[in-house]
Image (cartoon, rainbow, N blue to C red):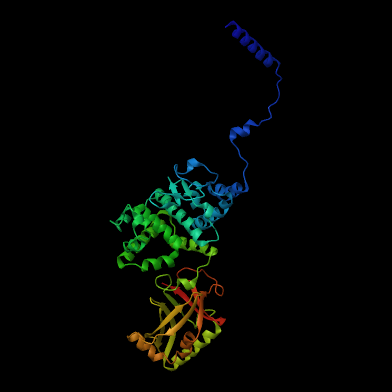
Amino acid sequence: MKKIFNKSFLAIFALIAFASCKKEGTLNANLDILDRNEIAKTATDNWLDANFLNPYNIETKYKFDRFELALGKNIVPPLESQVIPAMEMVRDVWIKPYEATGGATFIKKYSPKQFILAGSAEYNTDGTITLGTAEGGRKIVLYVINTFDKTNLASVKQMLQVIQHEYTHILNQTVDYQTDFQLISRGGYVANWTQETLVNGRALGFITQYARAAPEEDFAEMASNMLMMGRVTYNAAVNNTTADGMAKLKKKEQYVVDYYKSAFNIDFYALQTQVQNELNKITPPNLSKLIGPTVGYTSLYSVPATDPNQSPEFLALWNTATAAVTAQTYRLKDMTMTFKANNVMTLRYSFTNASGATTYFGDADYTMVIDANGIATFTLAATQTAGTTYSNMGVINASMASVNNYFKNNKFKIDWINKIIPGSIGTVGSLGGFYKQTDNNSYFYGVLGQ
């Protein structure tokens, strides 16, 4: 014990001596920076600050934080190179339309305060994947950032569909929707919605399978799908189901429209148009794929004599027909093409008696075939439908020969007319044209409707 004590005493003495001889100096470390946990911002951080944090007080977290995501799930961190492209679309397709219709301060007042970005999806045990979540009206988590492509319309729609859905929940938490909304499809909500088909769901008044999960999901799916599908495609989907399903979907649509107006003074259809205008900047819709009762437009209406910028060739043919009809003591007014199922197009001319007091309709059925390149061919049907309007066509048929032959003897490229007459595309009321395949300067156009 004594030996050990002596050695310990010497060690202690040495330490005291060392300490007493130590020289003092200035510490070079900046402890203030460490205390504030500051990290140098990247160009991505600065862009996010300028586009989200500063104008809207919305934080975007992309640097991986495991505690922001579901524990027990394998989730890949986002690539920094993907952050700005993804958030550009969030700004353009989500924020800008709401600012345009709800006012400059709308997003500042009603918005999540944080976006969390994850590189991959969250995979669930029931075989589904989670593409986004909203928590407490304050945070939206966006997944699959690493495969996002802002030049690919489907990729943009997938991500923005999630935001529109989750943002509807946030708005509902601010102002609740009418509770009797859930009575429209009462009995149709199911726990295992993943086992249900879209066709059956729409027959019951649900726009998607997920809408059947719960009334609040139904409302959010209605709003988000109306925004992302656009009115033309949405209307086509609604009109392509059972009468009962159609009635329920139209009733739910009205609830959504009324909610946005009463709760936030937003014209929902104007918001819908703004969203579609932004999406159309990515990829303009292909008009040839939007012709028909199950996919989009069902009519084209034209008044060739007064519509501006009808092509000279078609206008001359129309004027020739007008003169011939006038010689029969009638007045030619306009024409309507109605696009029906099974490639049927019904061409209708309206005309009046000499005084203009009585209007007549003359109909003729054509087969309209649109090939993969968007080229349409019209063939007069060998058998016409019986009825007064078809008999009326016989009255003026010879006088309309110049126009009828133009339709029958040419092939037409279907496209928008906005390059000739500026205007929106992809909406109800947009202008669509049929351009002669052999001469792009020869065409007829009209107002597209449903």
Q: Is residue 130 above or below residue 369?
A: above
Which of the 4 image quarters holds residue 366?
bottom left
Name the residue at 52% across, 42% down: 65
In-front residue for pair 131/388: 131
In this view, which residue lies farthest toward the left? Answer: 187
Residue 43, image x and y in percent?
62, 48
In-front residue for pair 207/330: 207
In-front residue for pair 60/122: 122
Which of the 4 image quarters holds residue 231?
bottom left
- Picture quarter with the N terminus: top right
Q: Is residue 358 above or below residue 251?
A: below
- Picture quarter with the C terminus: bottom left
In-front residue for pair 189/301: 189
Q: Is residue 247 left or right of residue 343?
A: left
Q: Is residue 316 left or right of residue 128?
A: right
Q: Is residue 267 visible?
A: no
Name the residue at 62% across, 46% down: 42
Q: Is residue 332 above or below residue 225?
A: below
Residue 144, image x and y in percent?
50, 52
In this view, which residue lies farthest toward the top? Answer: 2
